[in-house]
Amino acid sequence: MNFPFNVYLPALAGAFLASLIALPAWRKWCQRTGLVDDPGHRKIHASAVPLAGGFTVLTGIIAPLLVGTALVNWYLPKSNITEYWLNYGLNHRALELAAIIAGGIGMVLLGWLDDKYELRPVIKFGGQLLIAFVVAAAKVRVTLFVHSTVFSYAITILWILTVINAFNFMDNMNGLCTGLGAISAWYFAIIAAADGQYLVTLLALLVCGALMGFLPYNFPKASAFLGDAGSHLVGYFLAIMAILPHFYTPQHPRGWAVFIPLLVLAVPLGDLVWVVILRWRLGKPFYIGDNNHLSHRLVRNGMTRTKAVMVIWLVAILLGGLAALLALNCA
């Protein structure tokens, strides 16, 4: 991990502070516009809670990214090797980066519409599909050793939709989705940094910092929720974080390395598979929520909700740590 920390740390800290500072303003906006989660079926909060997480986390990602890009392009000397590689990366992958950010904005807007108007599942799924297709068209794609453009599009779109809905399903207790997103982003940053993929590392650190800035408002007691806007955004960026790093290259021809992102995201993916299979066996639509997620089962076994969330975080930390060790040992 030979990239200077004087670039990594400002990205992480800037995203954290931007998110932390932005939340009160977004929370007031949500209250003023009626974008709140009211108490009701399967909900434990007694009063309306603003659904400010999506806009807050998006602000935490975009604000420092814009500031950093401006500094690199207009103020920092290109004679410095750090600024040279940053400038090269930003210019070389400008289309990909623009598509990724546009996709993130699109996911927040789609989630906001769902939070506000409760979109029909087919409309929400169609929106997810469209955004995933646009991102894939910008060459943010999975290959899995198969040299076929059609296959690459299909597997990329399937992957993005799967991870988005996995994190959407995990947004069922205070801090659970937010914490899992931050943990996963942190490990993707470590893995990318160790392999010299600096732009990927910076983007992952922005996501991690933005989520950490929102977490104090979301756990253990929540004065704001992620909502569908936030869970869509978290799942989307984590899906992208798994696509962007080059886990398999001619220099490192290790086919098994494609399983590293699956290990980092094992908790939300495992929970998704479990509840979908269970709902299918019970004859229920897979998109209709219930109380059979891992977090709910831990609570039914006697844990408090806070402890259940922390236990799931711990499992994600251990699995992510294993993925990082595998990646670092084979880098």
Image: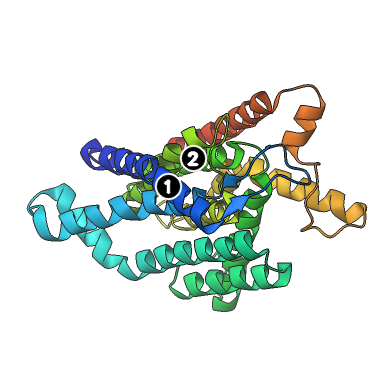
Location of the C terminus by quadrant is top left
Between 29 and 187, the residue placed more toward the observer is 29
Left or right side of 80 for 1: right
Determine the secondary structure under disc 2.
Answer: helix
Mark yes or no: residue 237 visible: no
Report how far apart the C-alphas of labels 2 and 1 lie in the structure: 7 Å
Q: Where is residue 241 shown, x and y percent of the image?
A: 47, 53
- Specify the farthest residue to the right: 282
Q: Where is residue 179 shown, x and y percent of the image?
A: 54, 37
What sort of colour scheme is used for the picture?
A: rainbow
| Label number found at residue 207 | 1
Q: Where is residue 28 shown, x and y percent of the image?
A: 45, 48
Determine the secondary structure under disc 1.
Answer: helix
Residue type for callout 2: Ala
Q: Where is residue 30 shown, x and y percent of the image?
A: 50, 53
Left or right side of 214 for 293: right
Location of the N terminus by quadrant is top left
Tell me the crowding category of disc 2: few under 14, some 14 to 19, or many 20 or more residues within 10 angstroms, Cα based.
many
Asked if 150 appears above or below 190 in the picture, the reply is: below
Mark yes or no: residue 280 visible: yes
Q: Are marks 2 and 1 in contact (CB under 8 Å)?
A: yes
Q: Earlier in the sequence, mark 2 or mark 1?
A: 2
| Label number found at residue 242 | none
Asked if 126 appears above or below 14 in the picture, the reply is: below
Q: Residue at x 31, y 49 (%)?
A: 198
Q: Which residue is mark 2?
A: 182
Asked if 105 appears above or below 197 in the picture, the reply is: below
Q: How many marks?
A: 2
